[in-house]
Image (tube, helix red, strand yellow):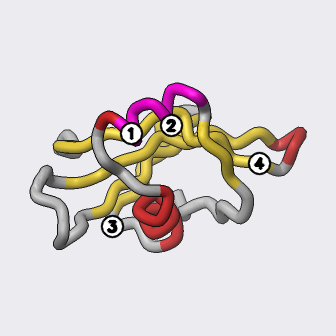
Amino acid sequence: MAKPIVNKWAFSPHAATRMMERNISVETIQQLIETPDLVLAQGPKWLFAKSFDVRHDNLVAAVLLERKDRELWIVLTVMVNFQARVK
């Protein structure tokens, strides 16, 4: 499945809290969404992940959900130390 086009996005309160806890900037999430290293479909949700040279906690990942009624993607949560499962 092709990477979805994410033009407009916003953070859920949960994602904003996790970003503060994990020292993840808005700019980091923007880079992750625009140029991910990995994109996985998980039902209606999408997982985007990216490695950043300035971070030493493995991949940074974000889970997004499209709100088609608002032409908006919601960043539901963000993670560090992410590892994709190999099947």
Q: Are marks 1 and 2 in contact (CB under 8 Å)?
A: yes
Q: Which residue is mark 2?
A: 16
Q: CA distance from mark 1 to mark 3?
A: 23 Å
Q: Which residue is mark 1?
A: 20
Compare marks 3 and 4 and give the one earlier in the sequence. 3
Q: CA distance from mark 4 to mark 2?
A: 17 Å
Q: Is residue 17 left or right of residue 24?
A: right
Q: Which residue is mark 3?
A: 37
Residue 17: image location, x then y, percent? 45, 31
Span highlighted in magenta in the image:
13-20
Q: CA distance from mark 1 to mark 2?
A: 6 Å
Looking at the image, the residue that sits furthest to the right is 69
Q: Residues within 10 Å of mark 4 (few under 14, many from 20)?
A: some
Q: Quadrant of the C terminus?
A: top left
Identify which amino acid the numbered label 3 is placed on.
Answer: Asp
Number of labels in the image equals 4
Give 3 or 8, whichever is nearer the viewer.
8
